[in-house]
Amino acid sequence: MASESEPPSGGPIRVADVAPRLEVLRERIAAAGRDPDDLTIMAVTKAFGPDAAEAALALGLNTLGENYVQEMVAKLTQVRVPEGVRPEWHFIGRLQRNKVRLLVGLVDVIETLDRPSLAREIARRMPSQRVFVQVNISEEPQKGGCAVGDTATLVNEARDLGLNVEGLMGVAAAGDLDRARSQFRTLRRLADELELRERSMGMTADLEAALAEGSTIIRVGSALFGPRAPRRRD
Ligand SMILES: *Cc1c(COP(=O)(O)O)cnc(C)c1O
């Protein structure tokens, strides 16, 4: 990982910087036994400017992930989208009910549906919205996601509300890759049981573990763009 020792970049993110990192990432994916063209590499652009999203789009990474509502809304208006390209924006951060309305018409997939009250608000504002249910596979109280045991109920509630539930999303505990892998295995088992196609799991630090457990979408920020500056509050 070339990025670990670099200082957070203050300057613009350029295609020429991201291209070799994407090459390294694709090699990591192949080394993990997966075909990089057979899964979605989401470019997580949080804390970076519109230039990061533009670099991703220039390199064919059309799936973009953002964590903070205001940051995403502002960035969307700034990103210059190349002719003929249709970016797909995924929301991957904690979502408060009172911010759902800000995402109307802007977000393609909300990956962090984790409670019935949020499902109701999304369904009310955005009928048949594409969503993933986020599962708290690490069982850490500070993390988002529904309890593993509540997943089926929440998926069914969301379906009953008319939401288009396409997959599950999970964030593993940091540090121990064997533990991360067993948490990803849990997400995969749940997705299989519920017949959900997409499993959004794995980020820069743990993507091999996620790929081994059948991830269909990896969410990658620092491996593409370098280290992030500390974030401001949303
Ligand atoms: C920031 C973030 C990522 C990307 O993290 P990196 O370590 O930069 O790859 C992925 N998923 C979620 C939910 C995030 O918040």
Image (cartoon, grey):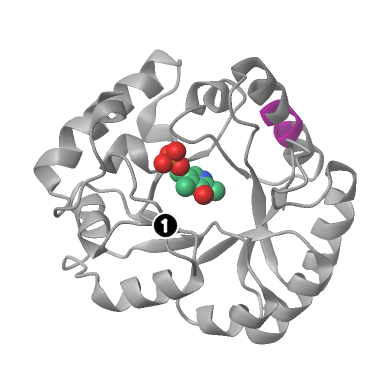
Residue at position x 32%, y 71% from top? 75
Which of the 4 image quarters holds residue 129?
bottom right
Which of the 4 image quarters holds residue 172?
top right
| Magenta-tinted stretch | 184-188
Q: Looking at this view, is 75 or 82 the one in front?
A: 75
Q: Position of residue 194 (x, y in %)?
A: 79, 45
Residue 198 visible, this orientation? yes
Q: Looking at this view, is 3 or 136 the one in front?
A: 3
Main structural element of the magenta stretch: helix, strand or loop? helix
**To which residue does mark 1 refer?**
231
Q: Position of residue 169 (x, y in %)?
A: 64, 46
Q: Is residue 114 left or right of residue 181?
A: right
Q: Taking 109 as reference, is 38 above or below it?
A: above
Residue at position x 30%, y 20% from top? 27
Q: Position of residue 42 (x, y in %)?
A: 41, 47
Which of the 4 image quarters holds residue 100?
bottom right
Does the magenta segment cover residue 109? no
Q: Is residue 200 left or right of residue 205?
A: right
Q: Looking at this view, is 181 or 29 the one in front?
A: 181
Q: Is residue 223 left or right of residue 191?
A: left
Badge 1 element: loop
Q: Taking 201 as reference, is 231 above or below it?
A: below
Residue at position x 17%, y 31% from top? 20
Residue 40 visible, this orientation? no
Q: Is residue 172 left or right of residue 103?
A: right
